[in-house]
Amino acid sequence: MSTVEQLHQELAGHNIPHEIVIVDDGSTDATWPLLQEIARRLPVCRPIQNMGAHGFGCAIRLGFATSTGDALVVMMADASDDCRDVVRYWDKLNEGWDAIFGSRFIRGGSVKDYPFHKLVLNRIANQCLRLLFAVPLNDFTNAFKAYRRTVIEGCEPILSHHFNLTVELPLKTIVRGYSWSVIPITWRNRRTGVSKLKIREMGSRYLFIALYCWLEKHLSRGDYMRQRKP
């Protein structure tokens, strides 16, 4: 769990108050005892077990419900995301934005060891979403993003049980009128473990969420738009 320790060191080194909620989504190995050991050494870590329906989206939603902070960052624990980017998210949120989206595909961003076939599918999917919603964002599908709690609450009901959550949250943030900005981030392919993302299985789920958000944008007459204070 070097990612957890590195994240804590990075945030503590910049005097950023934080908690690290780690969701064990039905592991069958020694993950849970390891998380408990980390929590004993690092009190800011709060491991929880997902005892309900499993899936990436379910785990993230449980993490949101368990956390107590006003700023929320979704981050993988497989060392694919750069802990230093979390500090940049924090600084950007403090400028007043409601959400910060990281992009690996703008100047200053980078990807390392991305399987070619997944990269091609990624760029096609993101370009389709960019055109469909007419917004200058080219990395919807990356989970590593930052939100104010008010945004997450404003995105309810959150429907995704799986990796399509990575598309649902930014699309609803945009469609419902929250402010957002983009910064370049660094991503590298996981060094350990095996990805649970099954492209063929997830295609219909991504399409469902994209169409759901598109219909909301054009047919809901603003019923779900952010309610601004007078």
Image: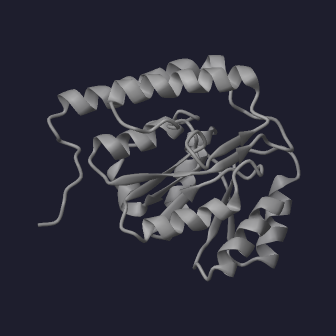
**Residue appearing at x 27%, y 26% in the figure:** 215
Residue 15 visible in the displayed image: yes
Q: Quadrant of residue 169?
A: top left
Residue 54 position, x and y percent, is: 64, 39
Colour scheme of this structure image? one colour
Residue 10 position, x and y percent, is: 70, 72
Q: Judge left or right: residue 153 versus residue 140.
A: left
Who is closer to the viewer here, 33 or 112?
Answer: 112
In which quadrant of the rendered image does the C terminus lie?
A: bottom left
Q: Quadrant of residue 217?
A: top left
Residue 53 visible in the displayed image: no
Is 139 located above or below residue 215 in the figure? below
**Residue appearing at x 57%, y 79% in the figure:** 17
**Residue appearing at x 81%, y 77% in the figure:** 41
Who is closer to the viewer here, 158 or 89?
Answer: 89
Residue 78 position, x and y percent, is: 77, 49
**Residue appearing at x 56%, y 43% in the figure:** 58
Furthest residue to the bottom? Answer: 15
Q: Judge left or right: residue 96 versus residue 147.
A: left
In which quadrant of the rendered image does the N terminus lie?
A: bottom right
Is 19 located above or below residue 110 in the figure? below
Residue 152 position, x and y percent, is: 41, 54
Is 160 located above or below residue 62 in the figure? above
